[in-house]
Amino acid sequence: MTDPSPSGEPTAVRLLFEYEGDEVRLLLQQPVDVAVSGFDLPREDVVGNHVEVRDANEEMLSRVPIRSGMDTSVEVFPEDPNEPITRTDVPRGQGAFTVVVPTTERADHVTVVRIPPTGDVAEAEAGAGDVVELGTFPLTGGAR
């Protein structure tokens, strides 16, 4: 949870992103006065997409999972309502998502990262399991 700042300024930022495939764009930064849960300095990398808050020296201050967004599949609704809804992979996902991240005086920018799964030899040779940076965006004055 973020601590309220002594000045009473918001201690979190709502970020609105748009993505197409692995291309990510930051559309909006909005300071908010809310407690942020579900983040921490990770003890180990967790597979998935995340937004990291970093300082000017690239030190990670927090990592927040992207819980809804950057999907690589879509729901397909059948014409016959008696048939089940299915999911299908898409070659290039697109959409938008929102994440609320904690901020401090040290917060300089955010970086959207993907941590792919590790497993078989082919994945390991391709570098799977390494953190992949998808985009870095400065935090604006009102967002810190």
Image: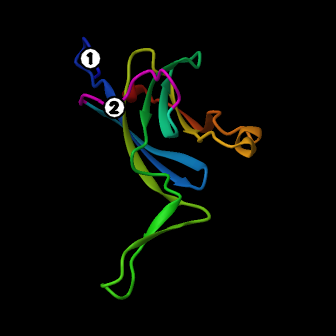
Q: How many marks?
A: 2
**Can you give x and y, in whole percent of width and height, for residue 74 in the image?**
46, 66
Q: Amino acid at mark 2?
A: Gly
**Can you give x and y, in whole percent of width and height, for residue 59 in the image?**
55, 17
SS class, disc 1: loop
Residue linked to disc 1: 3
Residue linked to disc 2: 38
Q: Is residue 29 above or below residue 10?
A: below
Q: Is residue 84 above or below residue 34?
A: below
**Can you give x and y, in whole percent of width and height, for residue 142 in the image?**
37, 28
**Can you give x and y, in whole percent of width and height, for residue 89 in the image?**
55, 65
| Viewer-nearest residue: 131 or 109 | 131
Q: Is residue 129 above or below residue 98?
A: above
Q: Quadrant of the N terminus?
A: top left
Name which quarter of the figure residue 77 lies in: bottom left
Q: Amino acid at mark 1?
A: Asp
Left or right for 22, reference 127: left
Q: Are marks 2 and 1 in contact (CB under 8 Å)?
A: no
Prevailing secondary structure of the magenta residues: loop
- Residue extending furthest toward the bottom: 80
Q: Nearer the viewer, mark 2 or mark 1?
A: 2
SS class, disc 2: loop
- Residue extending furthest toward the top: 6
Which residue appears at 72% of the width and 38% of the height?
A: 124
**Inter-mark Cα distance, 2 to 1:** 15 Å
Q: Quadrant of the C terminus?
A: top left
Q: Which span of residues is magenta-colored?
A: 33-45
